[in-house]
Amino acid sequence: MADDPRRFLHPATIARLSRLDLRARQVVEGFIAGMHRSPFFGQSVEFVQHREYTPGDDIRHLDWKVWSKTDRFYVKQYEEETNLRSWLLVDVSESMHYGRGPLDKYAYACTIAACLAYLLLRQQDAVGLITFDDAVRQVVPARSHRMHLDDVLRGLDASRPRAKTDIEGILRQAANRIVSRGMIILVSDLLVDRAPLFRGLEMLLHRRHDVLVFHVLDEDELSFPFAGITRFEGMEELPHLVCDPRALRAGYLEALEEYLTEVRRGCAQREIDYALVKTSDYLDAVLAKFLHVRASLKGKVRRQTHA
Amino acid sequence: MLEAINPWYWWGLAAIAAPIIIHLINRLRYRRVRWAAMEFLLKSQKRNRRRLILEQLLLLALRCLIVALFALLVVRPLWLLGSDQRLAAGLPSYHVIVLDDSLSMQDRETPRGDDRTTAFAFMVRFTQELVAHLQDAPGSHYLTVLRTTDPHMPELGRAASQLAGEAPGQPLTQDTLQQLRQRLERLTCSYRQAHPLPALREAEALLAAVQEGHRRLYILSDFRTGDWAEAEGREALRVLARLSHPRGGNTHVFLYDVAHPRRQTPEPGSDAPVPDTHANVALVDVQPESRLLTPGVPVRLRVLLRNFGTEEKTSLRIAARVDGREKPEVAKIVDRLAPGQERSVTLDMSFGFEDRLGSKAVTLYVDEPDHLPADNFRYTVLELRKEIPILVVDPEPGAPAGDAAYIEWALASSTRTGVRVVRVRPQELRVRTDLDDFAVIFLLNVAGVGSGFGELDSDSLRALEKYAARGGSLVFFLGPRVNAVSYNQHLYRQGAGIFPFPLDPQPVSGRRDAYLEDPPDPEDISPRLRLIQTQHPAFRILGDRTDFLYFLETHRYFRPDPKWQPDPRVRIVARLANRQPLVLYRQRALELADKLGREGSAGQGRLAQAAKRIRDWFVGAEHKRARKGPVLEVLADLLENPELASYWAEPVPQRKDLRRDIQQFYDLLLAGDPIIIEGQAGSGPAAGTVLVFLTSAAPTPIQGRDYPWNNWATLMDPNHFVLYVPLLLDVQQYLAGQTRARRETQSDWLLGSSARLQLPADRFGLRATFLELSESDSTARQLGQLTGHSGNDAVTFEVTAPDRPGFYRLDVVAPGGSAPASTGQIALAWNVRAEREGDLKRLAESEWRDLFAQALEQELKLTPDQARSFASSRVWLTPPGTASQGQQVREQLWSWSDYAALLLVFLLLLAAEQALAVRLSHHTEIGTVPTFVTSRSSAAG
């Protein structure tokens, strides 16, 4: 275990890091270090112009050749190329705050978002963030510079979560707000009615976005391991239920399976990339999925980005 | 409705609420989980709602039912019982307690323990506890307490014969308890042998009188093997079988073994260890060879000693006390006595001239501490007289070398023999009124009955017959004057006379003589006389000195009539050797020799050798007269040689036949004429013993011959030991004892049987006092007055057996008055029945089960399996616990078996509850959980 490069990707390890940026760094660096070959190439920046140095500029960017010829300080300016605009749509509603493992769904979703933001920013893609519960809570516009990570991470903070009621409306707002085409990554437990969900997703697709869904569920929600008389208190304004969970487990799993099938099938039909992740899963699975989708989009999206 | 056996457990029904309360508490004590995926949970609940509620309700109902059923099983309301039990529950219980107070219950815990450590004392304490616990049981109780020694006189309650249709027992109240306690405290263990059978029969009769109610029988005993394994025991077991089985008396039978060491608590049906048995040595019997003795003449006491224990006993000292004083010279040490061994020990006891005359209280005892001391003692009564008068009747009483002279010489040559001889002629008998004073009358060479010389006249004969009818002993020696025809006609009188058998009046055809003649044959080297009754006390000397038998010549003798059918009261004591000529047997001998030769040629050389020796001896048999010695030797060797034992033992039919032939031929060659016969003078109940010597008393010379009738009286060995003197002294002592025994009836009795004394009416009156004698100081304690019955010239007293062994006396008044009779003090001794009660071996659990099962099979026609299961489940030997017996009684009283069906339902419900609970608890494996499921848009590829 000590030599396992994936050890930093385990949810328990990540939970020990309180700061989200550190988490993101550890996950991503750990993930890349574990790869044999870098998947990033052709991502160079193009030189644009020289500009006279003003104090405060990074002296690393001084063009010493120009100085030797002209004895003036010029700074090289590059235009950082943003070849992908990605939007992270993170569900921070009340239901996301369930979890008995090291990370609850919310923390896990935030970690996913942070990791993806870090990864994208690292390769100079633009990352924007929309968090929502009953309505859109935070919007962080898409930027590609590295300091933008802090903005994104701040945006993930969610105090006093509320129930999400109208997923369709939220997705519509997102679609309206995100004008330029890009990649939309939805991180949510999708505990909503399916019809509005798919209508919302279709709206995004209609705007010609690429949509990637990370369906985050807790282990408990998938296996329902409870025993003994339990009072289940519904989050997001759902009713309470006192029952013997063992007696209901079979029915629960059956209903869950139906739901998962419906979600999976709905996504597949709409050519939405869909991944079900458990809060106990290693995070590299998420990243691998993302890179897989990202690689398949590479040509298509770069062509579409402006010069 | 609410009537029940344990009504105070009704509150148990409230426990029905328990499952409901537990359910409610569980509903209240839930965990809280804030749950996001309520959608699926609600959906699941909606789908399963009806089924779940049904199942939960069913389980709850089941649990409530189980609790309710359990409560009912404990409460036992009457309506739940079968009709029989419903009837029985309200009915009273009738208890019969049988207490074993036989001698063996005196068994002590330690050899030196006192009376408080006996099994009996323990039983008494246990009975008190048992009865006290009976009070705890519900319902009304009636109690009867019996003892095995006297079952018809209950300690509590009435005997079956006095019930007159009423139910048995006394109601169990505080007063009854008090009364019983007092009686039990006074109760002592008897010295008697008592079998439980009469008590069980009484108990059966008592319980049969119970119309409606519970019947309970408690047997408190030591359960000795001897009591149960024999015929009487089997009968007792059959009574128990009848009583205990529901098909019979339907009685709960409790068997408590109170003997020490206590039994291990048995598992019903299993083999409990065999209980230990205490060691015990007992004097089983004492037989004096004569009870009538004179100073200086030793009497031999035959003591039967038995080791009932399981270990060998060494250095056992048997000692004697006479009138309370030790007689150390009599004591004898028995080196070793193996377990179970019975040994006869002879003690010689004699009294000096200084000893007080009269009855002697003789106590013999084993000087050894013992668990059961009572059977170490044996009491007997002897009578010491100054002298014993003997009457000798001889036609020529004064003849110097006549029969009477020889007899007197043998019996009274020394004053130390204690015999006084009076010689008379036959005719003088009628004038003698003192015949009864003589212990023995010798009739020597009396011619017959008539008026001629040497004959008895009819009055004399009558006097003699009267003497014999009263138990007097007679000795006949025959001789040249004897008229066989007269003997047969008057003295034998078809068995009614004093002579016990008829004589052969003409044994040799063609000759008038009634006697047989056997001239001496010096070449014959075989014994001349064979003792048939080898243990006869009067002829011990012949058994001890077998060398004399080769020289005891009997040349003339009489023979019983061959047509006479021997009477069971008559026994042949001794026979002469077979005096038939050897040649008579030649044919048969040669046939046997041929057979032996054939067998011998088949391999057994010894047979061939024997055949040759037989053939050789019969060569010239005409000249060998009656000499059969060598043939007898050969045949005896064939029959008894240990080397041939295995040969005969083989199961080959021819060999068996051959051996039978040899035995028959041997017996034939030995079968000589009888020479000494013992019989009885007539057929009266007290008829005296008659001993007949079929030859003369003296070595009567024979005219014209150089040999006498016999040489018995003159025979002596090189040490001048004369056979005749001890022989006749033994005969006299034996017969004197017989006379006393017949006349004054038995003096030693066994406890438990009453004594019946028949005394001559001319000397004893009808009133008597029964006294107990103290052994040490001869003081007497009066026990009661008796009245006798007269009839048949005799007075009869029935003396009820006393309670304790020891010495007793019956003082009888003189006839017609109140003055004591001259010889009116009759000493008696009572002893314990040691041969039965001394055996302390106890029944093993398995033996009990086998015996009881057999009894069940026989009595109730059960199959062996049914019998065994009943025997091992219902009636078994129980060690008495210290405090739990009342509990046990209660448990039996409320036997679960009456509720078998209900119990079955209860168990089924329990099983159903478990099955349902397991099903409802959803102990399924946590598997098939959907794991990381992904899907990929196909268009993206």
Image: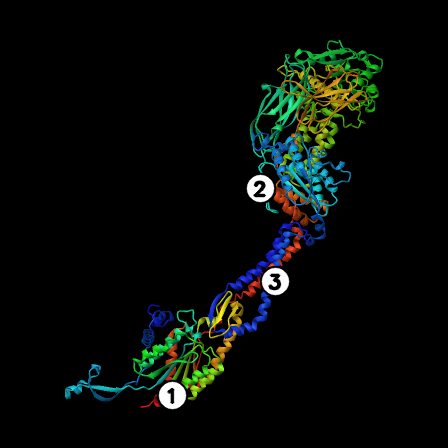
Observer-side mark, 3 or 2, equals 3
Residue at numbered disc 1: A181
Secondary structure, mark 3, is: helix
**Where does residue B541 sit, x and y in percent of width and height?**
66, 20
Q: How is the image coloured?
A: rainbow
Question: Image quadrant of residue B818?
Answer: top right
Image vertical order of residue B53 relative to residue A288, above or below: above
Cα distance between the residues tagged 1 and 2: 98 Å
Q: Where residue B757 appears, x then y in whole percent?
A: 75, 23
The chain that hosts pointer 2 is B
A137 or B79: nearer the eye? A137
The quarter of the picture where the N terminus of chain B appears is: bottom right
Mark 3 and mark 2 residues within 8 Å of each other at the beta carbon: no
Left/right placement of residue A135 relative to residue B430 reads left
Decide which of B591, B7 is in the foreground and name it: B7
User: Disc 3 or 2, which lies upstream in sequence?
Assistant: 3
Amino acid type at image mark 1: Arg
Q: Amino acid at mark 3?
A: Ala
Q: Chain of mark 3?
A: B
Depicted A76 relative to depicted B344: above or below: below
Report the chain holding disc 1. Answer: A
* Disc number for residue B61: 3
Q: Which residue is mark 2?
A: B264
Q: Is residue B286 above or below residue B856?
A: above
